[in-house]
Amino acid sequence: MTNFRPYPAHTQWTFRSRQYSGVERTTPLHLSWEVSGDPITDDYTPDEITAQELWDKWFPEYAKDGTAKLSWSVGGDGTFEAAPFSVHGRPYEHFLSIYTWPVHADTEEPLNWARLPVRDKVWNLKRADKGGFIQELTGWKPSPFEPVFHAETIAKAAGLMR
């Protein structure tokens, strides 16, 4: 039976450097997402501005047609690279151009990239992630490798727009 659920977050993956022979790494991996313009949060902290206020600044500037582009990265202990297969990524430089295809540390099963867990992003007094205001306010986070954020649709579904 095929499993379509994300891998558990603690799953260990092993991969090697393509540039430096003998350099091997084993770490859990996850996908991180960034919406165009969501680094607006770099200028603020949650005690200075709410998720709603950030949305109100971000939406008219970056989602003019109701959508915004998504880009993807792969992260793990000591690893953070552009994700392969990302529509809006840099095709010439990404995880697989730097490292070999990851395999499960115990079973050597090749990684199914679409099953990597997607990192949650939040914007509150305990944790303030770049762009976390979007998930904090709407409850939405993308599926792996989703290329576009339909901001207007999600805003309507979350009751932010009519």
Image (spheres, rainbow, N blue to C red):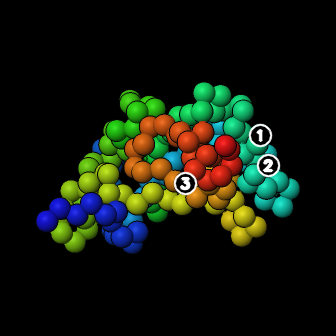
Q: Which is nearer the N-term, disc 3 or disc 1?
A: 1
- The label number, if any, that marks residue 57 in the structure image: 1
In this rendering, the answer to whether 8 lies above or below 139 is below
Instruction: State the CA–CA distance, disc 2 to disc 1.
Output: 6 Å
Q: Secondary structure at mark 2?
A: helix
> In the image, what residue type sits under mark 2?
Glu
Q: Residue 85: where, in percent of width, then height?
A: 34, 38
User: In the image shown, does 5 or 15 lie closer to the viewer?
Assistant: 5
Q: Label 1 near label 2: C-beta < 8 Å?
A: yes
For the residue carrying disc 1, how many other residues have a C-alpha within 10 Å: few (<14), some (14-19), or many (20+)?
few
Question: What is the secondary structure assignment of the residue under circle 3?
Answer: loop
> Percent from the top left, x then y, of residue 131?
64, 49
Q: Earlier in the sequence, mark 3 or mark 2?
A: 2
Residue occupying the point 36% across, 70% down: 8
Tell me, for residue 140, which label it has, or none.
3
Q: Distance of mark 3 from mark 1, alpha carbons?
A: 18 Å
Q: Nearer the viewer, residue 97 or 150?
A: 150
- x 65%, y 28%: residue: 64
Residue at the extreme front of the image, as rendered: 162
Left or right side of 81 for 136: right
User: Residue 135 in the image: x percent, y percent?
Assistant: 60, 55
